């Protein structure tokens, strides 16, 4: 898994790429470091991710919880249709605000 970071105004965009099945997820520690730096508006771009396993999902949930506790926000951009189905089946659409593009996610912070 690879994490790329890009700052767009006061929003940090994290682009995940690679196979996120059966890997140790580094997203939660990465997000915790961003929170410590005062970055509390985060978009997770999943355009380069087709599927991920339960470890990745757990790390995303932990990241979301850490941001909420720090009065921050996390939004999801570009989930594949398979990931959208997973979110729906697990009722995660009630947790994660998802958008079809990074631009739409960025606009939602305004």
Image: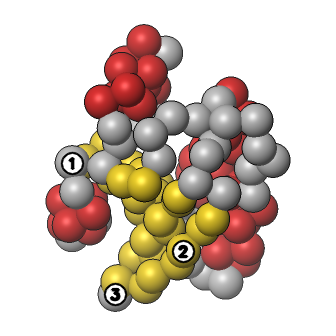
Camera-side mark, 1 or 3 = 1
Camera-side mark, 3 or 2 = 2
Residue 65: in sight, yes or no? Answer: no
Q: Do the residues bearing badges 1 and 3 touch, measured as CB atoms within 8 Å?
A: no
Q: Residue, x 47% and y 65% (percent of image)? A: 15
In the rendered image, the vertical position of residue 54 relative to residue 79, given as above or below: above
On screen, residue 51 versus residue 104, left or right, reads: right
Which residue is tagged 2?
Answer: 4
Q: Quadrant of residue 4?
A: bottom right
Q: Which mark is residue 1?
A: none
Residue 60 image offset from top left, x and y in percent? 61, 44
- The answer to which of marks 2 and 1 sits earlier in the sequence is 2
Q: Label 3, label 2: how many angstroms apart (C-alpha)?
A: 16 Å
Q: Label 1, label 3: how many angstroms apart (C-alpha)?
A: 20 Å
Q: Which mark is residue 100?
A: 1
On screen, residue 102 versus residue 92, left or right, reads: left
Q: Residue, x 38% and y 26% (percent of image)? A: 82
Residue 46: in sight, yes or no? Answer: yes
Which residue is tagged 3?
Answer: 9
Q: Residue, x 44% and y 40% (percent of image)? A: 50
């Amino acid at each position: 898994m690879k994490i790329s970071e890009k700052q767009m105004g006061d929003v940090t965009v994290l682009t995940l790429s690679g196979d996120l099945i059966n890997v140790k997820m580094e997203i939660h520690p990465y997000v915790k470091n961003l929170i410590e730096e005062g970055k509390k508006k985060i978009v997770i771009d999943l355009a380069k991710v087709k599927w991920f396993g339960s470890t990745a999902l757990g790390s995303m949930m932990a990241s979301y919880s850490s941001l909420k506790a720090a009065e921050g926000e996390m939004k999801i951009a570009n989930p594949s249709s398979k990931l959208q189905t997973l979110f729906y089946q697990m009722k995660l659409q009630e947790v994660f605000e998802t958008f079809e593009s990074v631009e739409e996610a960025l606009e939602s912070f305004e």
